[in-house]
Image (tube, grey):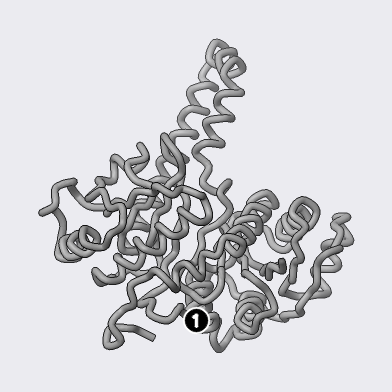
Amino acid sequence: MRIILDAFGGDNAPLEILRGAQQAVEKDGLSILLTGREEEIRRVAAENNISLAGMEIADAPDVISMNDEPRSILKAHKDCSMAEGLRRLAAGEGDAFVSAGSTGALLMGATFIVKRIKGISRPALASLLPSDKEPYLLVDCGANADCRPEMLLQFAQMGHIYMTHVLGRKDAKIGLLNIGTEEHKGGSLQLETFALLKESGLPFIGNVEARDVPAGAADVIVADGFTGNILLKTMEGTVSMLLHNLKAIFKTNLLTKLAAALVLPHMKGLKSRLNASKYGGAPVIGVQKPVIKAHGNADAAVIYGALHQAATFVETGVMDAIRAAVTPAEPAKEEE
């Protein structure tokens, strides 16, 4: 299997990208096609004793930054490492693409270079997040701020397929993120989506309030990208605040420092449980081939996780399952 990897995406590129790629080659036997400035890739690899065995390099002179306009991947930055990787994926030179670069640019490139699956109204960004039970999939978590009910139905269908195929959760339950659990709650988007999901044949359990999401209320949480992104960022901020305050408490005096020493292994376990990046990356679901967005601050372990996730995505036949199962959008409502 050949995975295309953006060597210059993210805050820690290219060093951590190369380290993660080396792990994927050595542990999983993957073949990696790196995209980016070849001379710099080889220099960084040599300086840090990173083997490039099992990897090829496609030279790309440009890099698109987090501050660049996402649409610039199609014109002004068409020669960047991300665009090169997406073009090669679309051309069949790899089975999946992974990048820790700009989320907006990746979504734009995935939509217009790799292109949507026929019948899909809009691709969505899905993210695995920790809960008191098993991780749940939040979809959409930022790709589409404005949505129609039929789009959320497709998000639910694609999210359910992803969970059943990639995570093997055959009984995955679907919940609609809302301001109350009652059927009559929410705005017109939530009310109409509820009706569609109720008649869809999916294992829909109804509305889910944000406070119940971390408790594992559902395996797939469906939302428009605006609401989903607020939930995602709130979860990230809450975890960060919690860990920061716990650390401050344990540094208060000698007694609390001694207590910290006693509970340190458990604290490390808690930190690991709350760390969403361990799940690899966020798949862009609804495009023709697997595209994975790794965290912008990804280290080698996260990059390896995203590559492993991409391989699982390919092996489990998610794309074919989505093509077969998703309710096509009405032609008049499809958007380019």
* Near-viewer residue (186 or 323): 323
Residue 37 is situated, as x and y percent measured from the top left of the image, at: 76, 75
Q: Which residue is mark 1?
A: 115
User: Residue at (46%, 48%) from the top-left corner?
Assistant: 169
Along the line of sight, the residue nearer the viewer: 96 or 323 = 323
The location of residue 282, given as percent across then percent down, is 51, 59
Q: Is the residue 301 above or below the residue 54 in the image? A: above
Q: Secondary structure at mark 1?
A: helix
Nearest to the observer: residue 33 or residue 49 = 33
Q: Residues within 10 Å of mark 1 (few under 14, many from 20)?
A: some
Q: Residue 309's spot in the image, x, y percent?
A: 60, 56
Please tell me in which quadrant of the rendered image residue 330 appears. bottom left
Quadrant position of the N terminus in the picture: bottom right
Callout 1 amino acid: Lys
Instruction: Name the quarter where the C terminus is drawn.
Output: bottom left
x and y, in percent, of residue 116 in the image: 46, 79
Residue at x-position 49% and y-position 81% = 115
Q: Is residue 180 left or right of residue 87?
A: left
